[in-house]
Image (tube, rainbow, N blue to C red):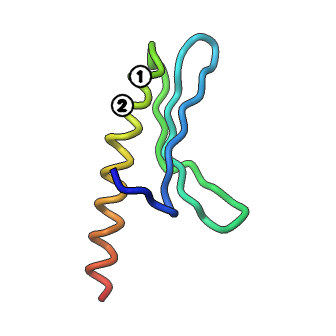
Amino acid sequence: MPKSRKYDMRVIEADGTWKAEIVRRASAKKSVVSKTQDGFVTEADAKAWAEKELAVFLELNEHNKRKRT
């Protein structure tokens, strides 16, 4: 999966469950959670969901770049 400077993912454990977030870099100092899903039983499940969703965000970002030019 290609790396993006604008989008990233993070996986967080809270109260025995896992939460995955897709994070968008709004500025040099500010990040915004674009999408989140919680209630995963394992870290691997959360990471798999986040990787899949991040790929969708990167694809849309690339599509929007091509459309602008």
**Which kind of residue does numbered mark 1 sit on?**
Ala
Q: Residue at x 63, y 56 (%)?
A: 31
* Secondary structure beneath label 2: helix
**Residue under circle 2?**
48
Q: Residue at x 31, y 62 (%)?
A: 60
Is 51 rendered above or below residue 17?
Answer: below
Contact flag, marks 2 and 1 (Cβ < 8 Å): yes
Is 68 rendered above or below residue 44?
Answer: below
**Residue under circle 1?**
44
* Secondary structure beneath label 1: helix
- Residue placed farthest to the front in the image? 2
Q: Is residue 54 left or right of residue 11?
A: left
Residue 12 location in percent, x, y?
59, 28
Q: Is residue 6 left or right of residue 50?
A: right
Q: In the rendered image, which quarter is residue 13 located in?
A: top right
Q: Residue at x 50, y 44 (%)?
A: 9
Is 15 rendered above or below residue 33?
Answer: above
Q: In the rendered image, which quarter is residue 10 located in?
A: top right
- Residue placed farthest to the bottom in the image? 69
Residue 57 location in percent, x, y?
36, 55
Q: Residue at x 30, y 51 (%)?
A: 56
Residue 8 location in percent, x, y?
50, 50
Is 69 rendered above or below residue 25?
Answer: below
- Residue placed farthest to the right in the image? 29
Quarter of the C terminus within the rendering = bottom left
Please tell me the numbered disc located at residue 62: none
